[in-house]
Image: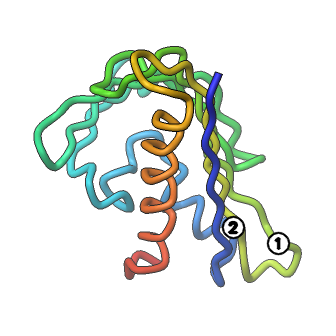
Amino acid sequence: MANAASSIELAVSADRVWKVIGGFGSLPEWLPYIPSSELSEGGRVRRLTTQDGRTIVERLMAFDERARLYTYHILEAPFPVVDYLSTIRVSDTGDGKSSRVDWVGEFTPVGVTDEEASAIFQAVYDDGLSGLLRGAIF
């Protein structure tokens, strides 16, 4: 089993960050290379379209509004992995004015090494979270 993890601290309250990234269908609002997200099955499945037209289908496995986290599983994707499970969490850093976002995932590589698979998702997580700093979404 391989993994990837990224985190970022923001000078924005956890509640405000969660309002932007906490919706299971909200990736297009903050992740630049996902321009489209369609929800189905009562909001438990999202069909994402990438900038280059590829499709990723994910299922919401757990959602906790109070803890500001959700966990999802990839059902279909152009990635060389199976058994992908990931969690996004927004935490208050203690002062009520700043927060930390953690994005972690585990998966089993198929046809590539653990390191190669981890590098794919490390780049996604790092770029996605860095985009929160670059974007004027808060």
Disc 1 marks a residue whose amino acid type is: Thr
Q: Quadrant of residue 106?
A: top right
On the image, the x and y values in percent for residue 136 come to 38, 82
Secondary element at tag 1: loop
Locate residue 95 relative to residue 17 in the image: left or right. right
Q: Foreground mark, 1 or 2?
A: 1
Which residue carries the number 1 mark? 93
Report the residue at 82% width, 72% height from top.
93
Residue ranking furthest to the left:
53
Q: Distance between the Cα atoms at labels 1 and 2?
A: 8 Å
The answer, for residue 63, to whether it is visible in the render is: yes
Q: Quadrant of residue 131?
A: bottom left
Q: Residues within 10 Å of mark 1 (few under 14, many from 20)?
A: some
Tags 1 and 2 touching, CB below 8 Å: yes
Locate residue 53 relative to residue 74 in the image: left or right. left
Say which quadrant the N terminus sits in: top right
Q: Relative to residue 132, is residue 60 depicted above or below?
A: above
